[in-house]
Every structure is written in structure tokens, then in C-alpha cells.
């Protein structure tokens, strides 16, 4: 029962574009495809599989 603007979405590829554009907070990993990077405001410093999700979780936790 969340609205799209209440969702944080992490992606890395062109198949994530629609979700990245709909989410209230869209995030891509450091090694994301350029098309995905182009539609987001936030990008992790760590690549996918090497701490990116932890980085996002730590950032979200620091916002509250």
C-alpha cells in the first residue's frame, strides 16, 4: 500500500529504467549502464556485488 514516491529502488541496467523513473528515490550502482545513470540522481561509490546495497542501506538509515 505504498505510493511510488515512498519507494527507494536500486538498479543497474536498462531493464530497470521504468522502475527507476517511477520510484521516489532511484539509485544506481557505480557500475550501472549509462542509460540507467542518466535517469537517476544518486549513484553509489561501490559497484554491484561489492558493497553497493550496504552503502544504500547505511545511507537510508542515516536519513532518519
Image (cartoon, rainbow, N blue to C red):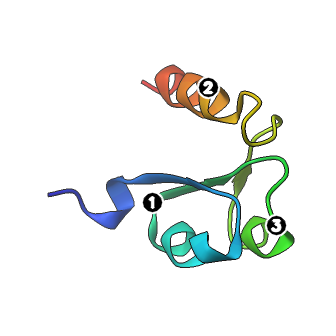
| SS at circle 1 | loop
Q: CB under 8 Å between callouts 3 and 1? A: no
Q: Which residue is mark 2?
A: 54
Q: Residue 1 appears at what percent x and percent y? A: 14, 58
Quarter of the figure with the C terminus: top left
Q: Residue 54 appears at what percent x and percent y? A: 61, 25
Q: Indicate which disc, 2 or 3, sits on the residue closer to the N terminus.
A: 3
Q: Indicate which disc, 2 or 1, sits on the residue closer to the N terminus.
A: 1
Q: Residue at x 78, y 76 (%)?
A: 35
Q: CB under 8 Å between callouts 2 and 1? A: no
Q: Indicate which disc, 3 or 1, sits on the residue closer to the N terminus.
A: 1
Q: Residue 52 appears at what percent x and percent y? A: 70, 35
Q: Residue at x 74, y 48 (%)?
A: 29
Q: Residue at x 58, y 22 (%)?
A: 58
Cα separation, mark 2 vs mark 3, equals: 20 Å
Q: Residue 26 appears at what percent x and percent y? A: 57, 57
Relative side of 28 to 4, left or right: right
As drawn, which residue projects farthest toward the front?
49
Quarter of the view holding residue 46: top right
Q: Which residue is mark 1?
A: 24
Q: Nearer the viewer, mark 2 or mark 1?
A: 2
Cα separation, mark 2 vs mark 1, equals: 19 Å
Q: How many marks?
A: 3
> Which dot marks residue 33?
3
Amino acid at each position: 500500500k505504498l505510493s511510488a514516491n515512498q519507494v527507494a529502488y536500486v538498479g543497474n541496467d536498462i531493464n530497470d529504467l521504468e522502475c527507476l523513473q517511477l520510484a521516489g528515490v532511484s539509485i544506481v550502482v557505480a557500475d550501472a549502464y549509462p542509460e540507467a545513470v542518466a535517469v537517476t540522481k544518486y549513484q553509489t561509490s561501490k559497484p554491484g556485488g561489492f558493497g553497493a546495497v550496504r552503502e544504500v542501506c547505511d545511507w537510508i538509515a542515516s536519513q532518519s
